[in-house]
Image (cartoon, rainbow, N blue to C red):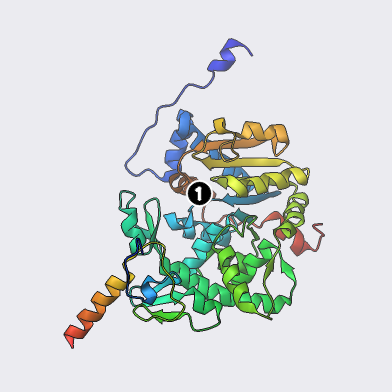
Amino acid sequence: MRREDFLKNPVEHVKIGSSMTIDELMRQFRGSGSFGAGRLAAACDTYEKMLRDPECTIFLALSGAVVPAGLRTLVKDLLRSKLVDVIVCTGASMVHDAIEAVGGRHYRGDWLVNDGELYKYHIFRIYDIFVPEEDFVRLDYRLSGIYDEIAADRRGGSLGSNEFAWELGKRLKDSDSILRVAYEEEVPIFMPAVRDSEFGFIHWLHSSQQRDKEILLVDAFKDVPTICGIFGASPKNGMVVIGGGVPRNAVQSAAIASKKGLDYAIVVTTDHPEAGGLSGSTLKETVSWGKVKGDADKVMVNGDATMIFPLITASVIERLGVDFKRIPYLKRVKSSGRSVD
Amino acid sequence: MAGNMKVDRFCGNCGSHNLYEYPLRMFCSTRFDKGKNPIVETLWCCDDWNEVSQECYCVREASRLKKRNHSRR
């Protein structure tokens, strides 16, 4: 590179207006191009490209307490608007959704609180969010009955975690539920670590009661060919990661196993790469594995997803406009009668 | 309960209790396991009572509420 190549793009200073929209602010951030603001603006551009790419299947990887922190409706609306094609998440993410689907709530609290006092009142804390124990218990009670129904329907046959999620969604009547909307819109939800959540403990309740009845069998290994099949059938694949952990790894592993590699990648995380954990690993590092293509459109935004993810989606939805209609690639192929195998 | 203090036995201080409707009704995991109705009164008790590992306010709050409701009649 020549010296002048390094000095082509001067920083444009951010100008704020009194009636500025979110996308206008993101475009100002793009002009500055610096630090977190620059990465946030780049993430908006990358998500817009994914959505406008007619051959791209979009995976949303969710970890952390996204639903308790108030992003349940946002995720549900993304599914309803077909702006996400597949969810890969922790079991806990969907437990939190199911808690609200059966009438429970998460409450705004405070992190400077006496946790011993909370224990005595049977209130659980997720940083500055409170959840009453009875909301978990009611979910346990209700879902153990649903597990009985699913097990009876399946007669000893096992389900992948995505099939399990749809079986739950089919039986939850709340139209604001992510599980319900995923079932209605036929959006797969994979929960590779499904047992590591309240769903696992509800299974314990259900199976302890069954005696000579059928026991629900969820086989997370069954997910592998299914998710790899989705990758393989899509000409291009993109991921939006909130947090990281098992969901991010599951998406990236499927990208390798299907020999596709990701064409687009956005990671929003508070983790850092130095400790070697996956949640903080850089997208540059993923290129060495073939998880993300070397020439992929990729950006990592370091920060709190409860702020960053709504900003990205609001900006991109504004850009797309009200008339934008997206039909996911695999649905188009399916409706045309072509095989996706 | 902490220490060796003798306590009055209630569902609300039993090791099998979880909340159902705070503070008056509890979900009993032992009864659920046995196929019995798991929803019990906080101030009830049965022969399966076992010591809770950490004290909570269930019995105290249920007793207060019960007392208040009685005094209103």
Q: Which residue is drawn at 48% across and 67% down?
A: A99
Q: Which residue lies furthest to the top in this view?
A: A3
Q: Which is nearer the eye, A270 or A42?
A: A270
Quadrant of the frame with the N terminus of chain A: top right
Q: In this view, does A91 lie above or below A48?
A: below
Residue A333 visible somewhere in the drawing: yes
Q: Which residue is drawn at 61% across and 43% down?
A: A49
Quadrant position of residue A133:
bottom left
Left or right: A331, with A69 as reference point: right
Q: Which is nearer the eye, A213 or A186?
A: A213
Quadrant of the frame with the C terminus of chain A: bottom right
Q: Residue A121 at x, y = what percent?
A: 33, 64
Secondary structure at numbered mark 1:
helix
Q: Residue A82 at x, y = what percent?
A: 60, 58
- Pointer 1 residue: A313
Q: Residue at x 47, y 37 (%)?
A: A27
Q: Which is nearer the eye, A48 or A152?
A: A152
Residue A173 visible somewhere in the drawing: no
Q: In this view, does A89 lie above or below A307?
A: below
Left or right: A102, with A226 as reference point: left
Q: Residue A64 at x, y = what percent?
A: 51, 50
Q: Residue A309 at x, y = what percent?
A: 49, 47
Q: Which residue is drawn at 28% across and 72% down?
A: B61
**Chain identifier of the residue bearing label 1 in the image:** A
